[in-house]
Image: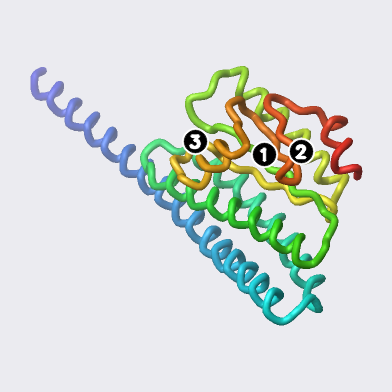
């Protein structure tokens, strides 16, 4: 009987460790996919920054090309972010995935700065709308509010199209630049929305209220 118990214990341990290894393999596969997506996003972001520098040096004849590139980059990086967020929520074993999210947040912040610079250089009249939110250690109420705000902003983006640049930024990523943003705009409640670097709303902001500013 003792031998049976020992064999059963060894078998249970084997199954347990095999399960852990499979979990690690799955999460590493997720991480590889995230890194691949963000590597392409890095290239696109650097391309956009170089184009902005080119415009500053040689003139405005490429403004329309830069705008199209920025819009395409906005759409792609936003969709990539949604996929990464889903994978982070499902992650168990690899904290490296959260580091990739921090990298994604930096890309979004750079995209915002590029958009502002391009708007000033080329005289475009689109609006920049930044969605600030927390991802970790949130209450149920805050989670619901974040989802509501994200839905409102997506609906507004669908309505506005090229008239609006939507930039989601996670604030609890331990990034100095993000901390500077929250301090500059005096944000203490989430979700929060910044429109055109001038108007700050904290808590859930309705579509009608935002539409008064962007007028799409």
Q: Residue at x 62, y 27 (%)?
A: 190
Q: Which mark is residue 198?
A: none
Image quadrant occupied by the C terminus: top right
Q: Are marks 1 and 2 in contact (CB under 8 Å)?
A: yes
Q: Which mark is residue 131?
A: 1
Question: In the image shown, does 163 or 194 lie closer to the viewer?
Answer: 194
Q: Which mark is residue 172?
A: 3
Residue 98 in the image: state x and y as whole percent.
44, 43
Residue furthest to the right: 216
In the rendered view, how is the structure colored? rainbow
The secondary element bearing badge 3 is classed as loop
Q: Residue at x 75, y 41 (%)?
A: 195
Can residue 181 be spotted in the picture?
yes
Q: Residue 183 vs residue 204: left or right?
A: left
Give the class, few, some or many, for how many residues have Cα within 10 Å of label 2's Cα (few <14, many ≥20). many
The secondary element bearing badge 2 is classed as helix
The secondary element bearing badge 1 is classed as strand
- Closer to the chain start, of discs 1 and 3, is 1
Q: Are marks 2 and 3 in contact (CB under 8 Å)?
A: no
Q: Label 2, on which residue?
A: 153
Residue 31 in the image: state x and y as whole percent.
45, 51
Q: Residue at x 58, y 61 (%)?
A: 41
Q: Residue 108 vs residue 209: left or right?
A: left
Q: Residue 95, located in which quarter of the rendered image? A: top left
Image quadrant occupied by the N terminus: top left
Disc 1 to disc 2, C-alpha distance? 8 Å
- Closer to the chain start, of discs 1 and 2, is 1
Q: Residue 86, located in which quarter of the rendered image? A: top right
Q: Residue at x 54, y 63 (%)?
A: 42
């Amino acid at each position: 009987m003792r031998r049976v118990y020992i064999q059963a214990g060894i078998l249970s341990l084997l199954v347990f460790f095999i399960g852990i290894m499979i979990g690690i393999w799955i999460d590493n596969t997720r991480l590889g996919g995230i890194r691949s997506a963000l590597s392409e996003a890095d290239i696109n972001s650097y391309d956009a920054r170089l184009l902005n520098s080119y415009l500053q040096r040689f003139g405005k004849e490429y403004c329309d090309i830069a705008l199209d590139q920025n819009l395409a980059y906005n759409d792609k990086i936003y969709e990539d972010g949604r996929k990464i967020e889903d994978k982070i929520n499902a992650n168990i074993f690899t904290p490296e995935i959260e580091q990739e999210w921090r990298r994604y947040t930096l890309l979004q912040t750079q995209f915002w700065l590029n958009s502002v610079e391009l708007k000033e250089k080329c005289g475009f009249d689109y609006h920049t709308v930044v969605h600030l939110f927390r991802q970790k250690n949130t209450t149920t109420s805050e989670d619901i509010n974040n989802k509501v705000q994200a839905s409102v902003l997506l609906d507004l983006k669908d309505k506005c199209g090229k008239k609006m640049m939507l930039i989601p930024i996670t604030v609890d990523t331990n990034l100095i630049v993000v901390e500077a943003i929250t301090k500059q705009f005096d944000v203490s409640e989430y979700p929060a929305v910044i429109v055109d670097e001038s108007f700050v709303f904290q808590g859930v902001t309705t579509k009608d209220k935002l539409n008064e500013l962007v007028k799409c």
